[in-house]
Image (spheres, rainbow, N blue to C red):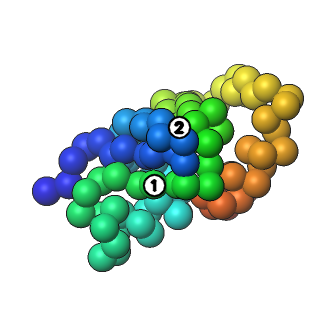
Amino acid sequence: MASKYITLISGDGYEFVVLREAAMISPTITGMLRNQFAEAKTGRCLFPEINGVILGKVVEYFNYYHKNRDKEDVLDMEIPVDLCLVLIEVADFFGLDEQQS
């Protein structure tokens, strides 16, 4: 049986343990964990092109979304202006722009 948690690893070696259910909002991660890839067996997903600061913000979003998914009138998540452009690109990579209409 798969673990309740997975580990996301940045290109600069930072590791983030995240609730599997929260990370599965990403079609990219879902694909990695549901197919015959090594990540499905180990529960560890390496993202060599993403640094720790950015991946940390992505993990923060996974947890934020998971915690607030059934709530209304939720405050926006704080995002530093200097990270916005990179986070838009990474959100596209993870398929997060496909989540809600």
As drawn, the label of residue 46 is 1
As drawn, the label of residue 55 is none
Q: Is residue 61 visible?
A: no
Q: Is residue 59 visible?
A: yes
Q: Which residue: 53% across, 64% down? A: 28
Question: Relative to 3, is 56 above or below?
Answer: above
Mark 1: few, some, or many residues within 10 Å (few <14, many ≥20)? some
25 or 35: nearer the viewer: 35
Q: Which residue: 41% across, 55% down? A: 45
Q: Would you say 3 lies left or right of 67 here?
A: left
Label 2, secondary structure: give it: helix
Nearer to us of marks 1 and 2 is 1
As drawn, the label of residue 59 is 2
Q: Earlier in the sequence, mark 1 or mark 2?
A: 1
Please state the horizontal and vertical placement of residue 100, each as a whole percent of the image: 67, 53
Q: Would you say 96 lies left or right of 89 here?
A: left
**Which quarter of the figure is the C terminus placed in?**
bottom right
Q: Amino acid at mark 1?
A: Leu
Q: Would you say 29 lies left or right of 48 here?
A: left
Please state the horizontal and vertical placement of residue 16, each as a whole percent of the image: 43, 36
Please state the horizontal and vertical placement of residue 73, each as a whole percent of the image: 69, 27
Q: Which residue: 55% across, 55% down? A: 48
